[in-house]
Amino acid sequence: MIKRFIAGAVCPRCSERDKLRAWINAEGTQYRECVRCGFEDAIYAQPPGEIETRVNQPRSGPTTSEDIKPIRFIPDSED
Ligand SMILES: [Zn+2]
């Protein structure tokens, strides 16, 4: 088992660059660890679907549905 440093990789925990080492275990799963803070996780072929840092924010802004009401006068047409 050879652990190799990942060039340019940034640790997701401590944000240190060039501190991550990666290796592949006997089952073929690739792991990575940070030699600075001890972070360790597995790297899978399929990337995760969600990004942890993304925050869903509700839409902000004025609501115009109650402010603007179309007013239309329909004259009674009596022939
Ligand atoms: Zn780290």
Image (spheres, grey):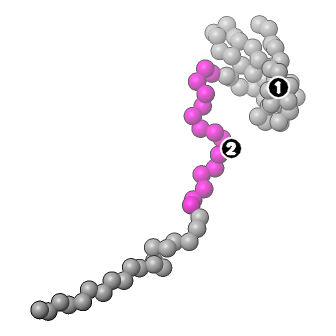
Q: Main secondary structure of the magenta part?
A: loop
Q: Which label was assigned to residue 53? A: 2
Specify the quadrant of the image occupied by residue 31: top right
Q: Which label was assigned to residue 40? A: none
- Taking 46 as reference, is 42 left or right? right
Q: Which residue is rendered at x = 33% and y = 83% of the image?
A: 72
Reading the image, the residue beneath label 1 is 8
Farthest front residue in view: 79
Please tell me whether residue 49 belongs to the stretch shown in magenta.
yes
Helix, strand or loop under label 2: loop
Report the magenta residues as a range. 44-59
Placement of the C terminus among the 4 image quadrants: bottom left
Residue 22 image point, x, y percent: 76, 17
Residue count near mark 1 (Cα–Cα under 10 Å), binned few <14, some 14–19, many ≥20: few
Q: Amino acid at mark 1?
A: Gly
- Are the two marked residues, 2 and 1, in contact with CB atoms closer than 8 angstroms? no
Placement of the N terminus among the 4 image quadrants: top right
Helix, strand or loop under label 1: loop
Farthest bottom residue in view: 78
Q: Nearer the viewer, residue 72 or 49?
A: 72
Check the image and report above or below for 74 versus 27. Answer: below
Specify the quadrant of the image occupied by residue 3: top right
Residue count near mark 2 (Cα–Cα under 10 Å), binned few <14, some 14–19, many ≥20: few
> Which numbered disc, 2 or 1, marks the residue closer to the eye?
1
- Taking 12 as reference, is 71 left or right? left
Tag count: 2
